[in-house]
Structures are given as C-alpha cells and as structure tokens.
Image (tube, rainbow, N blue to C red):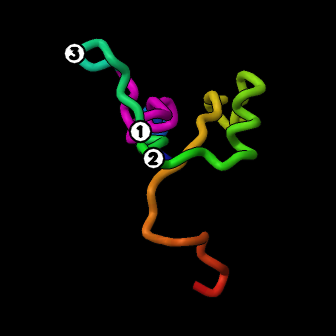
Amino acid sequence: MASDDDYMAFLNKANEDPSKGVANTSTTSAGSKKQLKATEEGVSLPEPIANLLKKGDAFYVSDADEPFEGVALKTSYDSLPTQGT
C-alpha cells in the first residue's frame, strides 16, 4: 500500500497543467501572439484545404478543439513520399 506522500505525489502529478511542455502561444512583450509557422511565402495551400477554410470556421476535433489552420511549407521533394520511401 502506498504512503500518504506517494499518494499525494500521484494526485499532484494528475492535476498538473496538461499544456505543460506544449509550444507556448502566450503573447510576447510586443503584444503579438506566438504561433508555430503554418505557411511560407510562395507556397499555397492545397486546393481542398483552401476550399474548406473558405467555408468559415473549421475545427480539428481534439482535447483542445483548436481552430483548424491550413499548413503549406516548402520541401525539397517534388511529390509526397510513398510507403516504400
């Protein structure tokens, strides 16, 4: 049987902030919001994703239910990798 201290440590860990260790999206001293890069200059979103986003707010259903954001980044590949590569 666990001691009271072990049980309290378990409860404290279970009640930790779930966003601990996740990219920080708080505001900076300049007042702008920090975000991960989703698009790059000269790269356009794939047409199906762009059409979906034009319809209005779309959400990626998850624990956080964050708004869906299209991603288009530069790569050195001409096409998507296949299962064999």
Q: Residue at x 71, y 23 (%)?
A: 57
**To which residue does mark 1 refer?**
36
Any part of residue 21 in sight = yes
Answer with left or right where residue 82 lies relative to residue 56.
left
Q: Nearer the viewer, mark 3 or mark 2?
A: 2
Residue type at mark 1: give it.
Answer: Leu
Residue type at mark 3: give it.
Answer: Ser
> Height in image: 29 above or below 12?
above
- Residue 26, by quadrant, is top left
Q: Which mark is residue 42?
A: 2
The location of residue 21, given as percent across then percent down, is 38, 41
Q: Which residues are magenta?
A: 13-26
Which numbered disc, 3 or 2, marks the residue that appears first in the sequence? 3
Give how far apart the Cα atoms at labels 3 and 2 are: 29 Å
Residue type at mark 2: give it.
Answer: Gly
**54 in magenta:** no
Circle 3 sits in a helix, a strand or a loop, which is it?
loop
> Height in image: 80 above or below 16?
below
The location of residue 20, given as percent across then percent down, is 40, 36
